[in-house]
Image (tube, rainbow, N blue to C red):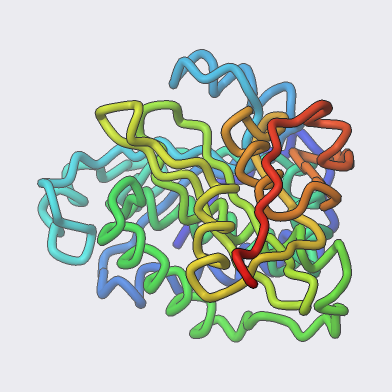
């Protein structure tokens, strides 16, 4: 895989080396024998936000954007589309050009810290994620998302870039935030394009995660907070210590979610994170003068 680097933002050489190393395994993992190339631009948040607005109509920054050159048939990826790849042959590159990838360096570094692993691994993952898009993978549907995640993990495993043991305290807020960030990746949000993840910790120390799940009939949409709490309640949990909510923009819980949290634990802490930002409130601050009802045991 030939990479054309455009360095509009500074990134440590060891991180760039890890990214280039991981990229070398993308084509072999996909079963592509042709020489292929891609453009990789490293930039700041403002730049990627402008590109996101201009090309996708979404006015916010993100971690990575991919713009494939190849038009794949539905359900097909690069491994079964050699003729389409050949149509993108570039004489100057002496390779089939797959497309452009833009990566936000601030997002890369912030997510590495939030997920508790190195910038090397986060950089490698973001580039592999982008190349997978260029090879025809997507994550809008649950089945597509599972297929893409499997390919990403296959590539990183082949490259020897494994998940790192950070020895993070599972009862820490940092771990709860990390779990919320991971849950956000599973979001089904094709209408709002506003993925949200949540992780709730019970007083017994267990953690349950959830993401927002949208529906064409908007009233059937379920928020990430309620997904996580309903999972916990369905397992017999009734008391919660804290909830972390992660999004690409400020993800304060809606009124319905605040009332659901109030039903079980009016004193729980609510932590929200987006980009490099983090804020915390008590549920009582978010829902003063809440609607309550005293449940009395019917015992004689």
Instruction: Name the image quarter holding the C terminus.
Output: bottom right
Does residue 82 appear to the left or right of 3 in the view shown? Answer: left
Residue plotted at (62% across, 35% down) = 62
Q: Report the front residue among 142 and 35.
A: 142
Give coordinates of residue 223: x percent, y percent.
Answer: 51, 41
Give coordinates of residue 131: x percent, y percent.
Answer: 44, 55
Q: Is residue 17 above or below residue 69?
A: below
Does residue 28 appear to the left or right of 180 in the view shown? Answer: left
Does residue 258 appear to the left or right of 105 in the view shown? Answer: left
Mark count: 0
Residue plotted at (85% across, 50% down) = 267
Residue plotted at (33% across, 62% down) = 35
Give coordinates of residue 57: x percent, y percent.
Answer: 46, 15
Instruction: Name the image quarter holding the N terminus.
Output: bottom left
Residue plotted at (35% across, 76% down) = 28
Q: Is residue 53 above or below residue 130?
A: above
Q: Can you see residue 262?
A: yes
Q: Report the front residue among 96 and 182.
A: 182
**Figure quadrant of residue 243:** bottom right
Q: Report the front residue among 300 and 104.
A: 300
Q: Can you see residue 180?
A: no
- Tell which residue pokes out farthest to the front in this image: 300
Give coordinates of residue 193: x percent, y percent.
Answer: 46, 31
Does residue 32 appear to the left or right of 29 in the view shown? Answer: left
């Amino acid at each position: 895989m030939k990479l054309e680097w455009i360095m509009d933002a500074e990134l440590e050489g060891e991180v760039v080396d890890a990214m280039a190393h991981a990229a070398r395994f993308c084509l072999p993992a996909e079963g592509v024998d042709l020489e292929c190339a891609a453009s990789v631009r490293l930039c700041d948040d403002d730049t990627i936000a402008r590109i996101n607005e201009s090309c996708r109509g979404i006015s916010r920054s993100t971690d990575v954007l991919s713009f494939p050159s190849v038009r794949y048939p539905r359900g097909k990826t690069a491994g079964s589309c050699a003729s389409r790849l050949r149509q993108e042959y570039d004489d100057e590159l002496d390779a089939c050009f797959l497309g452009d990838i833009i990566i936000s360096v601030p997002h890369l570094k912030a997510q590495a810290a939030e997920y508790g692993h190195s910038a090397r691994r986060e950089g490698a993952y973001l580039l592999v994620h982008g190349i997978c898009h260029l090879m025809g993978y997507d994550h809008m549907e649950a089945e597509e998302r599972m297929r893409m995640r499997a390919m990403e993990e296959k590539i990183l495993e082949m490259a020897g870039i494994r998940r790192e043991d950070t020895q993070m305290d599972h009862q820490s807020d940092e771990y709860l935030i990390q779990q919320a960030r991971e849950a956000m990746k599973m979001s089904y949000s094709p209408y709002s394009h506003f993925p949200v993840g949540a992780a709730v910790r019970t007083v017994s120390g267990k953690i349950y995660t959830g993401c927002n799940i949208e529906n064409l009939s908007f009233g059937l949409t379920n928020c990430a907070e309620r997904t996580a709490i309903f999972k916990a309640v369905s397992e017999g949990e009734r008391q919660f210590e804290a909830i972390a909510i992660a999004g690409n923009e400020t993800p304060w819980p809606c009124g319905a979610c605040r009332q659901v949290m109030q039903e079980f634990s009016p004193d729980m802490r609510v932590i929200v994170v987006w980009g490099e930002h983090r804020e915390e409130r008590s549920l009582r601050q978010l829902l003063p003068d809440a609607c309550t009802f005293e449940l009395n045991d019917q015992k004689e």
